[in-house]
């Protein structure tokens, strides 16, 4: 301790100069919009790069699990190809099917930052505006819904996690199609609640919960989880369902960002339907 105090005493002019420089820098940042913007952008860039390097190291230890999931997804895709079906009719012809139009496109991204132990959790992805990602796009994996894109920079995206108290997802019970709302009421990151389900609906533990398709963000029938318990809380007239998430949010690596190609068109027609007077 004595040596430390002697060192500070011998170099007190340097430490005083350093302190004054820091104070001057803080005043400059607080009072100059240009310098403040430059500082924020620089910090965001450095933070993104640090997350990127940290994730590179962590990914090495999860290669086996990633390969297993990729193999499972490839298997599901192969099962849907024409080569997986037996030809039973020699009179084969081709035609242009105009009934089905592509509604969703997907961008694969890597999770470089994630939290599950807070009341409001976010993710950071390694892709942004330059890769076609925009705010209000859905984020999913093969195991379920992950969240909604909140903010976007050129190369990174911030995602409002499903584990956020403000997140609301329109969902349904797969076996009967009854609707409800998925929300996270903390603190267990492996469970969410499904609310606003009428009391007459038949529910059993193990039932699968999926997206309803009523959202402009997520496609229909995306997995969310399975029913673990349900009850009607005092003072409420709807069932509250406890749902076990299929995806482990503490072990996210790769996700798919979903773009609804007809989202703006749907929003426009719904807006005009609400605002224009009707005369019958």
Image: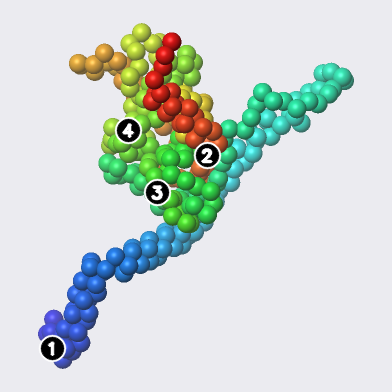
Quarter of the image with the N terminus is bottom left
Residue located beneath label 2 in the image: 259
Residue 13 versus residue 23: which sits nearer the camera?
Answer: 23
Choose mark 2 or mark 1, whichever is in front. Answer: 2
Question: Is residue 172 visible to the viewer in this orientation of the structure?
Answer: yes
Q: In what element is the residue under mark 2?
A: strand
**Vertically, is 1 above or below 167?**
below
Residue located beneath label 4 in the image: 184
Sooner in the amino-acid sequence: mark 2 or mark 3: 3
Bin the neighbour count of mark 3 within 10 Å (Cα to Cα): few under 14, some 14-19, many 20 and up.
some
Report, in whole angstroms, how far the alpha carbon at label 2 lies from the one at label 1. 62 Å
Report, in whole angstroms, how far the alpha carbon at label 4 lies from the one at label 1. 55 Å
Residue 71 versus residue 99: which sits nearer the camera?
Answer: 99
Image coordinates of residue 123 in percent, x first then y, are: 40, 47
- Mark number for residue 151? 3
Discs 3, 1 touching: Cβ within 8 Å: no
Image coordinates of residue 192 in percent, x first then y, are: 35, 30
Discs 2, 3 touching: Cβ within 8 Å: no
Choose mark 4 or mark 1, whichever is in front. Answer: 4
- Mark number for residue 261? none
Residue located beneath label 1 in the image: 9
Bin the neighbour count of mark 4 within 10 Å (Cα to Cα): few under 14, some 14-19, many 20 and up.
many
Image coordinates of residue 268 in percent, x first then y, are: 47, 31
Residue 97 versus residue 5: which sits nearer the camera?
Answer: 97
Choose mark 3 or mark 4, whichever is in front. Answer: 3
Question: Is residue 206 visible to the viewer in this orientation of the structure?
Answer: no
Image coordinates of residue 89 in percent, x first then y, are: 84, 18
Sooner in the amino-acid sequence: mark 2 or mark 4: 4
């Amino acid at each position: 301790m004595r040596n430390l105090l002697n060192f500070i005493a011998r170099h007190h002019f340097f430490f005083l100069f350093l302190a004054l420089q820091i104070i001057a820098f803080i005043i400059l940042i607080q009072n100059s919009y240009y310098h403040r913007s430059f500082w924020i952008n620089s910090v965001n860039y450095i933070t993104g790069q640090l997350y990127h390097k940290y994730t590179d190291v962590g990914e090495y230890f999860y290669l086996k699990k990633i390969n297993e999931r990729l193999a499972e997804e490839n298997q599901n895709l192969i099962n849907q190809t024409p080569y997986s079906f037996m030809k039973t009719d020699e009179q084969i012809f081709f035609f242009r099917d105009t009934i089905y139009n592509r509604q969703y496109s997907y961008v694969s991204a890597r999770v470089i930052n994630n939290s599950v132990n807070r009341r409001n959790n976010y993710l950071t992805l390694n892709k942004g505006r330059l890769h076609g990602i925009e705010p209000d796009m859905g984020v999913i994996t093969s195991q379920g819904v992950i969240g909604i894109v909140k903010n976007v920079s050129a190369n990174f995206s911030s995602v409002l996690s499903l584990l956020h108290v403000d997140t609301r997802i329109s969902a349904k019970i797969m076996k009967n199609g009854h609707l409800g709302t998925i929300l996270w009421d903390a603190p267990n990151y492996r469970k969410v609640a499904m609310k606003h389900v009428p009391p007459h609906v038949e529910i059993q533990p193990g039932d699968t919960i999926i997206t309803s398709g009523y959202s402009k963000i997520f496609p229909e029938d995306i997995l969310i989880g399975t029913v673990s318990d349900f009850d009607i809380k005092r003072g409420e007239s709807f069932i509250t369902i406890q749902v076990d998430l299929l995806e482990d949010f503490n072990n996210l690596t790769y996700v798919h960002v979903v773009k609804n190609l007809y989202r703006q068109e749907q929003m426009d027609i719904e807006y005009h339907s609400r605002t224009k007077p009707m005369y019958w």
